Image (tube, grey):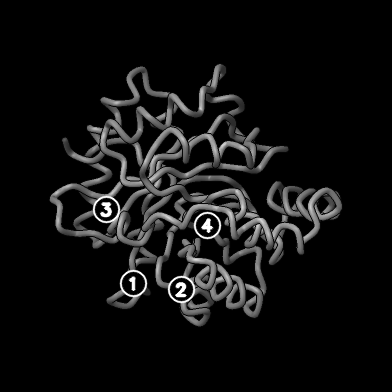
Amino acid sequence: MEGLLAKIIERKRKDLAQVRANLPLRELMAGIRDVEPPRDFFKAVSSIESRHINLIAEIKKKSPVKGVLIEDLKVDDLAKRYEGAGASAISVITEENYFSGNPEYIGAVKKAAKIPVLRKDFLIDEYHIYEARYLGADALLLIAAILEQSALSDFISLSSELGMPALVEVHNEREIEKALKAKAEIVGINNRDLTTFNVDINTTFRVIKEVPQGKVIVSESGINNSDDVKMLRDAGVHAILVGESIVTAKDVGKKIQELIGE
């Protein structure tokens, strides 16, 4: 790893010690028993019965490249608007230092909306997997680029045991191989290169050729309009994950409806 990604992971490792001290793993695991059962994220993103593409609408306050995207973030209000406009699921960024996310946003979104919620973060330890369920997440993001093969496999398995499907994010053919070896069922093709943060939607069209039939495919980042969505759907994509073009839109509801084809 290099550049900004390396800095994010380094900070994540440092913060983990304090997080564990504040809430030990044993207490975290015990607390999961009181959390409501997870909502069906897999069904939300894999359904092909509708003529519309499945949209995972992201709550994203800040980008480390573009800065603050939405000044006065009202998480519950945004979640209601996402659901009302037709989003299939909501992605909540919980990384605090570079994206101004917050783990507590998950609970707020779960109270405001009835659709499944994905925890999006740079998860590097089994503690983070248990923590996601404790927070109320229905699914979580695992980034192939930052995890060793064994860890990726273990985290997918643990996540499944906790009732949370893992959206395994890849950017190239090597990472696809890694994800498939780890038995990923939902593959997220990130059009953003996490080492440079450059975006190219053609990444999906290239990498999707390496994904076998039977896997659920999500395209992430750089999806701006209905033309992009049509090309992705024609290529075999089941769902899209969109953040910036939604949160920066003048009318969030209209933007979502444009993307899903309403």
Which numbered disc flags the more N-terminal residue, 3 or 1?
A: 1
Mark 1 surroundings within 10 Å by alpha-carbon count, few (fewer than 14), some (14 through 19), many (20 or more): some
Say which residue label 2 marks.
184
Could you tell me how far apart the alpha carbons at marks 4 and 3 are, in whole angstroms?
Answer: 22 Å
Say which residue label 3 marks.
232
Q: Which mark is residue 140?
A: 4
Which numbered disc flags the more N-terminal residue, 4 or 3?
A: 4
Circles 2 and 4: CB atoms closer than 8 Å? no
Which numbered disc flags the more N-terminal residue, 3 or 2?
A: 2
Residue 256 relative to residue 1: left or right: left
Which numbered disc flags the more N-terminal residue, 2 or 4?
A: 4
Residue 78, percent across and down?
A: 43, 27
Determine the residue positioned at 23% across, 32% down: 257
Look at the image and tell me in which quarter the C terminus lies: top left
Residue 104 relative to residue 59: left or right: right
Could you tell me how far apart the alpha carbons at marks 3 and 1 are, in whole angstroms?
Answer: 15 Å
Could you tell me how far apart the alpha carbons at marks 3 and 2 are, in whole angstroms?
Answer: 20 Å
Q: Which mark is residue 187?
A: none
Say which residue label 1 marks.
215
Q: Nearer the viewer, mark 3 or mark 1?
A: 1
